[in-house]
Image (cartoon, grey):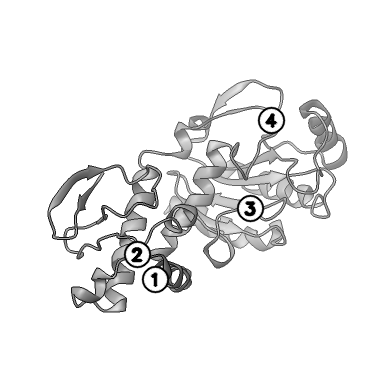
């Protein structure tokens, strides 16, 4: 929760930062007592200009990248003329709002851990990812009819090379990209076994984008964003490297072959073994 203030600096009480923001301008947020507060008021002409400039700077700041998730909400906010009245510089206003958005995102994902997420094996059996606690993981959204499908061979090679050192590849079929995974879970399992001799764990089909995004991929995308700070998964065979304690340490594009990831996995395992 963060505290809201009116234009004169009077407290309005606590506001749930993850709630939907309306266009009415009667409150403001702050993420840290050390950051001056911006009063949100109705100024439509300033709003459009400020949002465009603000979002451009967000894409270039590590802290501000955490606000990407809230773009759809932030564009409803009318930003204040009172910045100028209070003598704030543009940088002060931008940093304040970036920290607010970062605080919102941190709160939204508070307590979310890869080990607290449940999935279904490809045969439909429920399974907790806590079963993989203590292992380094490469989590991949896969498809059987994609130009990157031959990466199954490389993923299996990584699994066989490093599994005895505490590593696993987790495959999650997804049909959201060009409908390239249309089969049933049973058909997918048969394909992986017969065509690529896959032995690493495979799971039931999931959505990785949109309203029905599986909680695992929602957490992964938030933890490690993609191109230009965007969260959405762009295509099949996007990969996330997770360390032994559940931290998402790297995100790889679909075109990044398993062989190019081998060195990162070896280095991660070697660090953990020291």
Q: Residue at x 71, y 53 (%)?
A: 235
In the figure, residue 5 lies in which quadrant? bottom left
* Cβ–Cβ under 8 Å for marks 1 and 3: no
* Cβ–Cβ under 8 Å for marks 1 and 2: yes
Q: In this rendering, which labeled residue sits more in front, label 3 or label 4?
A: 3
How far is disc 1 from disc 4 in space, using C-alphas? Answer: 48 Å
How far is disc 2 from disc 3 in space, using C-alphas? Answer: 31 Å
Q: Could you say which is closer to the camera, residue 73 or residue 206?
A: 73
Q: In this rendering, which labeled residue sits more in front, label 2 or label 4?
A: 2
Q: Position of residue 186 (x, y in %)?
A: 80, 26
Q: Residue at x 43, y 39 (%)?
A: 113
Q: In this rendering, which labeled residue sits more in front, label 1 or label 4?
A: 1
With respect to residue 219, does 89 lie above or below?
below
- Looking at the rendered image, the quarter that the N terminus falls into is top left
- The secondary structure type at the circle numbered 1 is helix
Residue at the far top: name it.
Answer: 125
Q: To which residue does mark 1 refer?
A: 46
Q: Could you say which is closer to the camera, residue 179 or residue 202?
A: 179
- Looking at the rendered image, the quarter that the C terminus falls into is bottom left
In the figure, residue 209 lies in which quadrant? top right
Q: To which residue does mark 2 refer?
A: 79
- The secondary structure type at the circle numbered 3 is loop
Disc 2 residue crowd, few under 14, some 14–19, many 20+, Cα 10 Å: many
Q: Residue at x 52, y 60 (%)?
A: 267
Q: Which mark is residue 204?
A: 4
Q: Earlier in the sequence, mark 1 or mark 3?
A: 1
Q: In this rendering, which labeled residue sits more in front, label 2 or label 3?
A: 2
Disc 3 residue crowd, few under 14, some 14–19, many 20+, Cα 10 Å: many
Q: Which mark is residue 233?
A: 3
Q: Earlier in the sequence, mark 2 or mark 3?
A: 2
- The secondary structure type at the circle numbered 2 is loop
Q: Position of residue 171 (x, y in %)?
A: 68, 40
């Amino acid at each position: 929760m963060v505290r809201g203030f009116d234009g004169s600096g009077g407290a309005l009480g606590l506001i749930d930062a993850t709630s939907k923001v309306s266009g009415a301008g009667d409150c403001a947020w702050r993420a840290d007592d050390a950051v001056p507060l911006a009063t949100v008021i109705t100024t439509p002409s300033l709003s459009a200009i400020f949002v465009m400039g603000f979002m451009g700077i967000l894409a270039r700041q590590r802290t501000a990248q955490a606000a990407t998730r809230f773009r759809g909400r932030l564009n409803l906010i009318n930003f204040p003329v009172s910045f100028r009245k209070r003598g704030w510089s543009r940088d002060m206003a931008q940093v304040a709002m970036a920290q607010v958005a970062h605080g919102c995102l941190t709160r939204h994902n508070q307590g979310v851990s890869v080990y607290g997420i449940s999935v279904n094996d490809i045969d439909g059996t429920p399974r907790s990812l806590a079963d993989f606690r203590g292992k380094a993981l490469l989590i991949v959204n896969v498809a059987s009819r994609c130009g990157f499908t031959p990466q199954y061979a490389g993923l299996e090679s990584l699994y066989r090379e490093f599994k005895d050192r505490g590593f696993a590849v987790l495959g999650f079929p997804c049909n959201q990209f060009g409908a390239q995974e249309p089969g049933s879970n049973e058909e997918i399992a048969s394909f992986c076994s017969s065509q690529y001799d896959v032995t690493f764990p495979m799971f039931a089909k999931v959505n990785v984008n949109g309203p029905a995004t599986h909680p695992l991929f929602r957490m992964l995308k938030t933890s490690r964003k993609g191109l230009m700070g965007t969260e959405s998964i762009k295509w099949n065979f996007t990969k996330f490297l997770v360390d032994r304690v559940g931290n998402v340490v790297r995100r790889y594009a679909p075109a990044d072959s398993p062989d190019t990831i081998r060195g990162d996995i070896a280095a991660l395992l070697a660090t953990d073994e020291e």
